[in-house]
Amino acid sequence: MPNPWTGRGNPYTRLEVRARLQAALERGQPLLGAGAGTGISAKFIERGGADLIIVYNSGRFRMSGHGSTCGLMSYGDANAIAMEIGEFEVLPVIDEVPVICGVHATDPRRRMWHWLLKVKEMGFSGVNNFPTHCIVDGNFRQILEETGMSVEKEFEMVALARKMDLFSIVYVSSPEESRAMAEAGADAIIAHVGTTIGGSIGVVDAACSLDEACRRTQAVIDAARAVRDDVFYLCHGGPIATPADAQYVLAHTDAVGFVGASSLERMAVEQPLVEITQQFKAVKVKLRAES
């Protein structure tokens, strides 16, 4: 399904993306969505066989050596950063895999219909709700809800994206949010169970157990299934940091895939870079006698 204007895949229609995902499942393969904060990450994630590449603003911070949670803070224009990464780094190097744009739907400065037109014009095949307020909790979350920056804006963005023929793959952290996203028309729902553990900047004490991640993931799935039966379900975050972890969750829930960001592109470079640097440093040098 190449783009007739470029000879490459992107952009795809919403139904074309869905057909690609369904075909992967029919081949007996799990679905894999991968966050890419740089062009080189995206290029080799595609070669590895990912089904979707997702461009988040957090990818820039993550690949700059900072925690992904920077993407939730006011350290830059989240929508502009995702667009820039997509335009200049990711889309130019991707041959076929659908590329999804992270959209900060609660930004009060954006006319969302206008922004989604730009996302589509750039060649993205779909949207993701990141930064997302669904992973903010407590008193601060309540303040956001009461001051016009509600997670409801994310549901509205997804409903608008569906009208505009953009595929949508969305984060939720509760059954209530999952139900709302299903009602809004989301194509794929990701059970977000927290910031990824491990590596140099992963969480430790803030993570739930793998069994708790399974419980929360299944609750998200059950809530959306009560609304629609055509949603793809994936898991993400918290203790789900390795392929073995993802296998465990898929074996103990009805999820059919995994979305990795830190667990893919950040952890893929941390230890290998340490090891290759150490190996080069261990190269023997011929000592010359002093004259």
Image: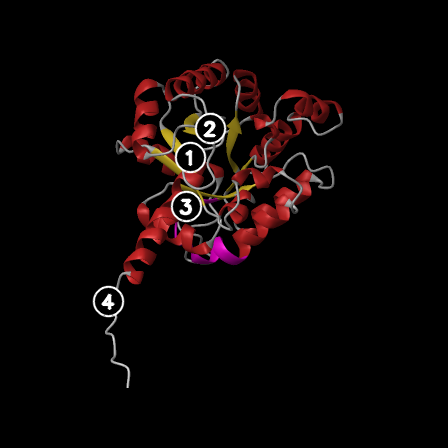
Residue under label 4, please give it.
Answer: 284
- Frontmost of labels 3 and 4 is 4
Q: Answer whether residue 16 is visible to the viewer in this image.
A: no
Q: Answer whether residue 54 is visible to the viewer in this image.
A: yes
Crowdedness of circle 4 by 10 Å Cα count: few (<14), some, many (20+)? few
> What's the mark number on residue 265?
3
In the rendered image, residue 78, in percent from the top left (x then y), is placed at: 62, 44
Q: CA distance from mark 3 to mark 4?
A: 31 Å
- Residue 32: name its quadrant: top left
Q: Is residue 91 magenta?
A: yes
Q: Earlier in the sequence, mark 1 or mark 3?
A: 1
Q: Earlier in the sequence, mark 4 or mark 2?
A: 2
Q: Amino acid at mark 2?
A: Ile
Q: CA distance from mark 4 to mark 2?
A: 49 Å
Q: CA distance from mark 1 to mark 4?
A: 42 Å
Q: Amino acid at mark 1?
A: Val
Crowdedness of circle 1 by 10 Å Cα count: few (<14), some, many (20+)? many
Residue under label 2, please give it.
Answer: 190
Q: Amino acid at mark 4?
A: Lys
Q: Residue at x 28, y 33 (%)?
A: 29
Residue under label 1, please give it.
Answer: 259
Q: CA distance from mark 2 to mark 3?
A: 18 Å
In the rendered image, residue 174, in percent from the top left (x then y), is placed at: 53, 19
Q: Is residue 290 left or right of residue 100?
A: left
Q: Nearer the viewer, residue 199 or 182?
A: 199
